[in-house]
Image (cartoon, helix red, strand yellow):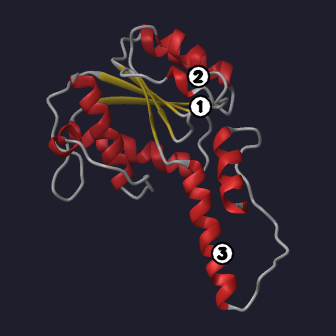
Amino acid sequence: MKTKKTLAMLMAGAMCVGLMAGCGSTTDSQKASTNTDGSAAASSFDGQISLIISNKDEFLSALDQSAKAAAQASGVELTSVDCASDQDRELEAVQAAVQNGADAIVINLADDTRAEEVIEAAGDVPVVFVNRTPQDTSVLDETHIYVGSDENDSGTMQGEMLAEAMKADGEDTANYIMLQGTAGLLHTTKRSEGVLN
C-alpha cells in the first residue's frame, strides 16, 4: 500500500511540475499525499522505482525530469530508461528492474497492445502505465493502474476550441491538416476521433 501511495505522490508531483494532467475527483488518500499547493508531500517510502519511457521526445523528456525532481524531493530512488520506441527493449528493462529490486515500475508503453506482457514480466511488482493507456484495459486492477488523460475528452476539447474559433470568424467549414501522435496507438486514434467529432 505504501508503494501505491508513493507512486501516486510521484506522479502528482511530476504532473504539477509543468505537465498537463486529466481532471478528476480526489480521494482522501490522494489528499493526504499532497500538500495544499498540489506538490508531493514528504514520504516515508524508501524503495526503488523504475521509470521506463518509450522514447524521450520533448513531452516524455519533461515527464522524466519532473518525475526525477519529484522523487528527489520525496527521498525516493528513481532510475529511468529510454527504450527508443522498442517494446522488446521495454520488456527487457522491466525484467532488469525486477532483477535489480525495483519496488514499482512506471512505464510509458511503446506498443499499447502489449501491456499484458509488461505485467507478466513485472511479476509481483506493481506497474503504473503512464500517458498511454493499454488497449486492453481489462489488464488494469489494484496493482496495475493507468495515470493519464482520457484521450477522447482531450480530442473533444481541441475540436471544441477549433469550432469556437471558426464560429467567431463566421466560418462553418474548414480544410485542415491533422497532426497526430504515434500512428496505431490508442491515444492517437481516440484523440483524433474526438477532434473530428
The residue singled out by tag 3 in the image is: 162
Q: Is residue 43 above or below residue 181?
A: above
> Disc 1 residue type?
Leu
Please provide percent x and percent y for residue 82. Answer: 57, 33
* x 81%, y 79%: residue: 173
The residue singled out by tag 1 in the image is: 109
Mark count:
3
- Quadrant into which the N terminus falls: top left
In this view, the residue in front, 72 or 126, is 126
> Disc 2 residue type?
Ala
| Mark nearer the N terminus (2 vs 1) | 1
> Disc 3 residue type?
Leu
Answer yes or no: do the residues labelled 2 and 1 have beta carbons within 8 Å? yes
Q: Quadrant of residue 158?
A: bottom right
Query: Which secondary structure lies at badge 3?
Result: helix
Q: Is residue 26 left or right of residue 41?
A: right
Mark 2–mark 1 Cα distance, whole angstroms, equals 7 Å
* x 32%, y 22%: residue: 48
Mark 1–mark 3 Cα distance, whole angstroms, equals 29 Å
| Mark nearer the N terminus (1 vs 3) | 1
Q: Is residue 174 above or below residue 66?
A: below
Q: Is residue 80 left or right of residue 9?
A: right
